[in-house]
Amino acid sequence: MADVLNIKNLKVIFRTGETFVRAVEGVDIRIGEGERVAIVGESGCGKSVTSLACMRLLTTPPAYIAADEFTFTSSDGTVHNLLEKSESEMLALRAEEMAMIFQDPSTFLNPVMTIGEQLDEVFVYHLHMKPKEARRHSIEMMKKVGIPDPEMRAEQYPHELSGGLKQRILIAMATSLSPRLLIADEPTTALDVTIQAQILALISERCEKEKMSLLMITHDLGVVREMADRVYVMYCGKIVEEGTVDEILDHPLHPYTKALIDTVPGVEEKVERFVQIPHNVPHPSNKPQGCYFSNRCAYCTELCKKKQPPLVSKESGRYVRCYYGTEELWEK
Amino acid sequence: MGEIILKTNNLTVDFKVKKNIFGKPDRLSAVQNANIEIRKGEIYGLVGESGCGKTTLANAILSFVPITSGSFEFFGHTIDSKTKPSEWKEVRKHMQTVFQDPYSSLNTRFTVWQLISEPLYIAGERDERVLRERAAAFVEKVGLSLQDLDRYVFEFSGGQRQRIAIARALITGSEFIICDEPTSALDVSVHSQICNLLLDLREEMGLTYLFISHNLSLIKHITEHMSVMYLGEIMESGATEDIFQNPACPYTEALMSAILDIRPKSGKERIILSGEARSPINPPDICRFAGRCPKACQICKEQPLPSPTFVGNDHMARCHRIGNEDKKYGKQ
């Protein structure tokens, strides 16, 4: 089975004035066909930049992207090298083969165009449909994503819709051409809990029906448990752990993953105090020497402070960036 | 359990919304007949989705918005819609608030000591030396250092800013603090730092909190009592543990089922509510949740919401189904 997306050693650097900020430092990501992959991490860890790099949505300059391998396989089997694509070639790939849902739906939609016009664009631009035919397809799509009364909604402007409905419109837009890969960047962070449950169920359903692969970017481990098959944990622009959902959430091997899980108390038991990770995520221009997590890690040793640990393979498909990286560590 | 320090009696807040300059304004019902009781030394949780009126209720207690009808008692004072500003100003000295977003709630042109001591300045203290000394005492209490006193807000991370906001709330010696989503703008690893700080300060200074949040698992861990709000009405209130064990209102049940737990699922079917909350403008005189309620019957859509019924020792809920489950509706 060919991988839909294959990234090896991705690096993204931003130029800010005289200095350079290394936002992503050598990330390997692989997404199989129909696979649901999540990237987890706190703000500033480079997860959004990685997803934007996949869509080639970063403006160069100030961003500079480099990778050993950066390929996307479209549904007809053609392998595209995303780094060598021109902007017009990328425009054709986006929406037809890869699509993206953003965090805040209200800033994504154009406030001076009706919902219908914005949905029509996809069909007019990519499939060269006549306006009337495009509208028929748009309304069909709105029905598919569960928007009540789509004919009326198509005539409305974004400000007349609630956050949940706007997110549904985005999902309709992104999935209308059945892309092969759907990237969702924190799709539910701006939404209420009950709406979050609706939207996640909708994304799962659309992915299953259209046989799409999913790349989910999130900081919420609950969303990961719900939505992903395989997980990458990112910290300060590097992948610190990789594995299946059950491996990562039930048997974490990296101290950062372990700490992230511990900070979220379970719903079943009651805790008196919360487990906390000391300090804050370091600024990208001010990362510690050695292991990036060393200044916050409870298990840090002299070695960690001196030298950056490599990403070591544990079992098949399981990688950890830690010198120790075993479950026995937690018993200390 | 200590004495009751805050008690609201059918507190109602309406806003008038005018569609045009002529005609009768519409009534936006933000809080409807809210009754809560907060005891000294406890943490009282207020949960609900955005737009359900939880912040408006807090603002009414802080006299940020005028009360339409009803009243509340605080430390022996009774405040209602006719209370003069001179009196509620007296009451307000004893309460403080920590806002959601520390990026917008702190003035960027003040240094930290000015920010922290500003409430004292407003209270009439003009001696700069005293102000600085008091600020210095509190800055260490919230886990910042004395060197931070002369720095500006932009030099701090979100978690540190929230610490400044907390110090600011404490400096006047208020015993009652309203925390309006104090962690939702922060990173996951910083959540627990702030929660632990709030818990420590309660212990140390004998504080009482009204804790507003949409994060149910957080509410479960830190509060003793809680209320669930939906579109301005309090649907269920009581001891947190009771509510989590036997949610009596279908809305509470749906909210709890929407929690994404990272621990392995307990095998419960998730309740996904359809649709979204209706507009709070001119609400009909029936259960406001009836339109989305998976268990709604004919009576829910015809008769007004019943007044709170005891379903446990310290647990009240409003629902037609309570006590009538078998007789009128048959088992579902």
Image (spheres, coloured by chain):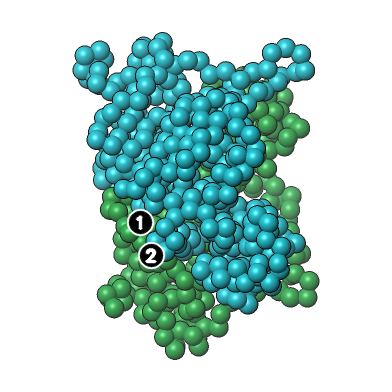
Label 1 chain ID: A
The quadrant of the rendering that contains the C terminus of chain A is bottom left
Q: Residue at x 44, y 55 (%)?
A: B207
Q: Amino acid at mark 1?
A: Pro
Q: What residue did someone put label 2 on?
A: A275
Color used for chain B? cyan
Taking the image as shown, residue B184 lies to the left or right of residue A55, namely left
Q: Which mark is residue B225?
A: none
Q: Position of residue A261 (x, y in %)?
A: 38, 61
Q: What residue did someone put label 1 on?
A: A265
Q: Contact (CB < 8 A) between labels 2 and 1?
A: yes
**Where A317 falls versus A290 (above or below)?**
above
Whichever of labels 2 and 1 marks the residue nearer the N terminus, that label is: 1
Label 2 chain ID: A
**Where A108 falls versus A230 (above or below)?**
above
Q: Position of residue B161 (x, y in %)?
A: 60, 62
Q: How far is disc 2 from disc 1 in space, using C-alphas? A: 8 Å
The quadrant of the rendering that contains the N terminus of chain A is bottom left
Q: Position of residue A91 (x, y in %)?
A: 70, 47
* Residue neighbourhood size for the residue with mark 2, other residues' Cα within 10 Å, grouped as few (<14), some (14–19), many (≥20): many
**Is residue B220 at least partly visible in the picture?**
no
Q: Position of residue A108 (x, y in %)?
A: 67, 42
Q: Amino acid at mark 2?
A: Val
Q: Residue at x 50, y 15 (%)?
A: B284
